[in-house]
Amino acid sequence: MAWFLNPALTRFRNEVNARWPRRDKTSDGTIGDTAHQSTNSDHNPDRDGSVDAWDMDVDGVDIAACKRAFQAHEAAYYWIHNDRICFRDEGWRPRSYAYAGPNRNRHDKHVHWNSRQSHERSTKPWFTTEDDMTPAEFTAALTVALDDAGVKARLRSIPLTYPVTPTQSLLSKFVTAFDKIDLLAAAAAAERLSTPATAKEQADLLREVLGDRAKEVGLILAEG
């Protein structure tokens, strides 16, 4: 039986190619090589001949946009990139891939996308407009962005100004400052904390995400 990339991932690949027609495909991959075939790899075909994994070269594409689109799709199962793995079943919270062993592929030259067998024949589009994002999809996308060191560095460089009055409620302050990335970062950081979280845990995570602006944002969140 001839192998084939499953329909859901084929559509994902086609949409990526359409959006970034000049992207590098050197590190792209679907069917497993000899080394993969001797292991329980998702690059090996299923009984129906379908392959449920696609490796996408990282050059020439917007990785954050791809992760955002992938995580919002019904067929998505997990991705691996830069020695981090992220599962649907774990709320799309990236974690270390070190458990795969010292000789693991750290996936720094490509992103590994893996689909769910139950939805491998989905025909739903992967990329939608930003207006179509649900609150849950936005939170997932923001969590992905905050895991990027470059994004954190840019967040810390943004000056904080909040034109609010003392009589505004806390909710009003959030609405007024909604376009301030630092405040969004603080809110996303709160989502990543276990419940209940101690004051020290909250402070530590704010410092991790916001750097030297953590105290200022923390004071804003504490008002009201």
Image (spheres, rainbow, N blue to C red):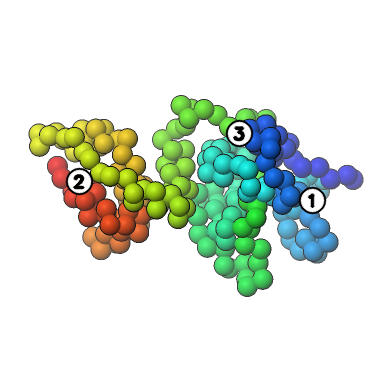
* Residue with the mark numbered 1: 31
Q: Residue 130 location in percent, x, y?
A: 48, 30
User: Mark 3 is on which residue type?
Assistant: Trp
Circle 2 or circle 3, nearest the eye: 2
Q: Residue at x 57, y 58 (%)?
A: 82
The residue lying furthest to the right in this view is 1
Q: Residue 11 location in percent, x, y?
A: 69, 34
Q: Residue 93 location in percent, x, y?
A: 48, 52
Q: Residue at x 20, y 46 (%)?
A: 220
Q: Is residue 172 left or right of residue 157?
A: left
| Quarter of the view holding residue 71 | top right
Quarter the C terminus occupies = top left
Q: Secondary structure at mark 1?
A: loop
User: Mark 2 is on which residue type?
Assistant: Ile
Q: Secondary structure at mark 3?
A: loop
User: Mark 1 is on which residue type?
Assistant: Ile
In this picture, is 59 found above or below 173? below
Measured Cα–Cα span from mark 2 to mark 3: 37 Å
Report if residue 43 is visible in the image. yes
* Residue with the mark numbered 3: 126
